[in-house]
């Protein structure tokens, strides 16, 4: 808990010590920014597929659809798993004194800076899962640009007091474990589909019985 609080306060103090950080957090932690994130992620997905060689685009499109659908399944499983185990971890802005609030510093109140259920961190789950997708599908340049963007969003969530640092860390581990499992399942389905396709192609190209 002491390390968690130390890291949080260091990031929280950046709101007043580093010019422009508080204003940036207003946009990164806006209460209605989730839909903008979805639109942005889908846009990057489309651009990353378009930038691939033509022969790889069909596979990348299948991987994209699988990633989005499997992530919805992960969220559903998470909800079902935590339904019976009520996790109510208050975010640091709700339990610590002397916290700098973006709403007080900027005069803009429509900012997410607290959570009664700080763990798991939803943005962390989504962004980590998404970066796992990009690692396999996008070029190195795109990947590292998106890593920087994701880190900025996740750091802002901690700096504003919406999550503890350990919420972000362990949520990332959960997302990586789920993404690895879903990738393995995708590869097995893909291999089974390719085997079936090659078998059908072999059967259709085989010569028919000769008539005498």
Image (cartoon, rainbow, N blue to C red):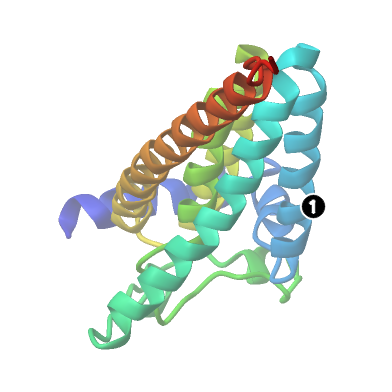
Q: Secondary structure at mark 1?
A: helix
Residue toward you, 11 or 88: 88
114 relative to 201 in the view: left or right: left
Q: Give the labeled residue for mark 1.
A: 39
Residue at (63% x, 23% y) in the render:
201
In the image, residue 149 sits, relative to residue 28, either above or below, namely: above
Q: Position of residue 70 (x, y in %)?
A: 51, 55
Query: Quarter of the image containing the N terminus?
Result: bottom left
184 relative to 109 in the view: left or right: left
6 relative to 94 in the view: left or right: left
Residue toward you, 38 or 116: 38
Q: Position of residue 68 (x, y in %)?
A: 61, 52
Res. 101 image quadrant: bottom right
Residue at (37% x, 47% y) in the render:
172
Residue at (75% x, 71% y) in the render:
107
Res. 69 image quadrant: bottom right
99 relative to 173 in the view: left or right: right
Residue at (46% x, 67% y) in the render:
75
**Image label count:** 1
Query: How dense is the environment of label 1, judged by Cα within 10 Å: few (below 14), some, or many (20 and up)?
Result: few
Q: Position of residue 160 (x, y in %)?
A: 53, 60
Can residue 50 be seen in this snapshot? yes
Query: Quarter of the image containing the C terminus?
Result: top right
Can residue 160 be seen in this snapshot? no
């Amino acid at each position: 808990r002491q390390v968690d609080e130390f890291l949080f306060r260091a990031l929280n103090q950046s709101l007043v010590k580093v010019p422009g950080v508080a204003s940036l957090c207003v946009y990164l932690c806006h209460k209605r920014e989730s839909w903008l994130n979805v639109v942005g992620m889908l846009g990057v997905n489309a651009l990353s597929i378009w930038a691939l060689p033509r022969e790889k685009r069909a596979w990348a499109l299948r991987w994209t659809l699988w990633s989005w659908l499997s992530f919805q399944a992960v969220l559903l499983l998470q909800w079902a798993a935590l339904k019976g185990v009520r996790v109510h971890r208050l975010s640091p802005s709700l339990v610590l004194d002397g916290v700098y609030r973006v709403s007080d510093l900027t005069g803009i109140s429509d900012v997410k800076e607290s959570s009664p259920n700080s763990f798991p961190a939803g943005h962390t789950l989504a962004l980590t899962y998404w970066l796992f997708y990009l690692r396999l599908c996008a070029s190195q340049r795109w990947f590292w640009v998106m890593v920087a963007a994701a880190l900025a969003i996740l750091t802002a969530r901690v700096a504003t007091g919406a999550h503890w640092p350990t919420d972000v860390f362990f949520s990332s581990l959960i997302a990586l474990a789920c993404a690895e499992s879903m990738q393995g399942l995708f590869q097995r389905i893909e291999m089974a589909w390719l085997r079936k396709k090659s078998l059908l192609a072999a059967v259709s190209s085989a010569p028919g019985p000769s008539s005498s």
